[in-house]
Image: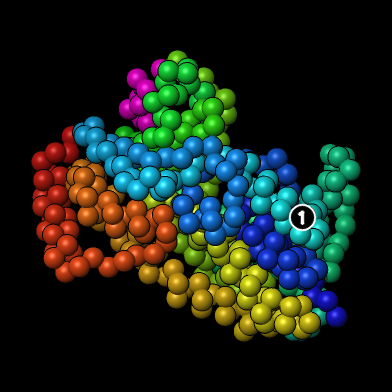
Amino acid sequence: MTLRVAVIGSGPAGSSAAETLAASGIETYLFERKLDNAKPCGGAIPLCMVSEFDLPPEIIDRRVRKMKMISPSNREVDINLINEDEYIGMCRREVLDGFLRDRAAKLGANLINATVHKLDIPGNNTDPYTIHYIDHTDGISQGIAKTLKVDLIIGADGANSRVAKEMDAGDYNYAIAFQERIRLPEDKMAYYNDLAEMYVGDDVSTDFYAWVFPKYDHVAVGTGTMHINKASIKQLQAGIRARASEKLAGGKIIKVEAHPIPEHPRPRRVVGRIALVGDAAGYVTKSSGEGIYFAAKSGRMCAETIVEASNSGSRIPTEGDLKVYLKRWDKRYGLTYKVLDILQSVFYRSDATREAFVEMCDDLDVQRLTFDSYLYKTVVPANPITQLKITAKTIGSLIRGNALAP
C-alpha cells in the first residue's frame, strides 16, 4: 500500500508538511482555498528560518538590522544587531506562502484549489477518512462538489480551522490583528530601509503591541488585541497611526487586513489519525506574537513523524504514533511558550510596566539574550552575574515605570 495524506491549508505549516511528505514518496494532497491569499501578518521571520527552510534571497523584502522600541511616553530605545550577517527577515505572506506551496507541488504534492467543508470520520483505526470539498480549479464560482479518501489528515487551515472543528479539538482564546499596508513617499520609505518599529501603550494596544514593519515598497502598520476587546480595534489602529503620523505622512493605504491569532495551543491537537499544526494547533507565541517559523517547523516535525512511523508510507500510523510529534514539539518549545506567556503577563498589563519593558530593552545583555533566542531559536543561559544584573534591572525598571508612565 501507499499511505495517503491530506494536508488542509497551504500556509507555512501546511506547505512545509506537504513538502516533507512528498519528498519521502508519500501520496500527498495539499488543499488550499485561496491560492492568492495574503494573510494579515507582520511578516517577520528569524534568521535561522532562512537557512533551515532554504529560502532564496528574493523571498526577503527587507533585512532589518535596527529595531526601535517606543514606550507609552514616547521614549525610544534603539536596538541594533551587531554582527553584519545577522538580520530579521521581512516578508509578504503572499510571496512566502506561494513559494513554499509551489515547492511542495514540484516535489510531488497534489495541489487542489478547493474549500474543505466536511470530514467523514471512520469508526476504526484502518478505514479511510472521507474529505468533502468544493473544487474551484475550473474557475466556476460555485465550484464542483467532490470527495477524497485518505488515511491521515494534517489540519493546517489557520485559527478558524474547519479540521479542528470536525475533530472536536476544543476551543482557545484568540487575539485580533488589524493591519494597513501603506505605500509611503520615497523619502519616508528610506527611513524604514532596514528599520522596524514596535509601539506599546494603552492607546495602541491594551494587551499587545503595535508595529510598523517595512516591506518591498510599503510598510505594514498594525496592532493586535484580545478578542474581548475587538470592538476597539479600529480605535487602537487610529492610535498607532497617530503615534507614527510624522513618519507616515503622505502615505497611501493600499490594503486593509484583519485576522484572528491564537493565544495558546488547542486542548487536543491529535485525535485519531488527524493532527493539527501551525495556527490551527495554536502555535503563536505570547509577547512577540510570532507564528511563521513555528508554523513551518510544526508542519515539518509532524510530517517527519508520519514518515518515520509509517516506514516512508508502508503502514498507517496510529493516534499514538502521531502523538509522538506532540511530545517532541512540547519538549522542544514548551518552555519558550511559557516564558513568553509570563513576560506578556508581567510587562503588558499597564502603561507603567510597558515603560519598564522598553527601559529593559535598552540593556545590551537583554538585547543579546533576546536576539539569540529570536534569531536562532536557542537560548544560551546567561552567566550568574549577568543574570543577577538583569534581575536587578527588571525590578528597577518596574519601579521607575510607574513614574514614567503617562
Q: Is residue 155 left or right of residue 348?
A: right
Q: Residue at x 77, y 78 (%)?
A: 313
Q: Residue at x 41, y 35 (%)?
A: 194
Quarter of the picture holding the C terminus = top left
Residue kind at label 1, given as amino acid type: Ala
From the viewer's side, name the closer residue of 164 and 181: 181
Q: Does residue 22 show up magenta in the picture?
A: no
Q: Is residue 322 above or below residue 351?
A: below
Element under disc 1: helix
Residue 190 in the image, given as x and y percentages of width and height? 42, 24
Quarter of the picture holding the N terminus = bottom right
Q: Is residue 344 left or right of residue 3?
A: left
**Residue 173 visible somewhere in the drawing:** no
Residue 66 in the image, given as x and y percentages of width and height? 35, 39
Q: Is residue 249 above or below residue 366?
A: above
Q: Residue furthest front?
A: 84
| Main secondary-structure element of the magenta-colored stretch | helix
Residue 52 in the image, given as x and y percentages of width and height? 54, 59
Residue 107 in the image, given as x and y percentages of width and height? 76, 59
From the viewer's side, name the closer residue of 251 and 398: 251
Tag 1 residue: 105
Q: Which residues are magenta?
A: 239-249
- Pointer 1 local density, CA inside 10 Å: few below 14, some 14–19, many at least 20: many
From the viewer's side, name the closer residue of 177 and 14: 14
Q: Is residue 96 above or below residue 277?
A: above
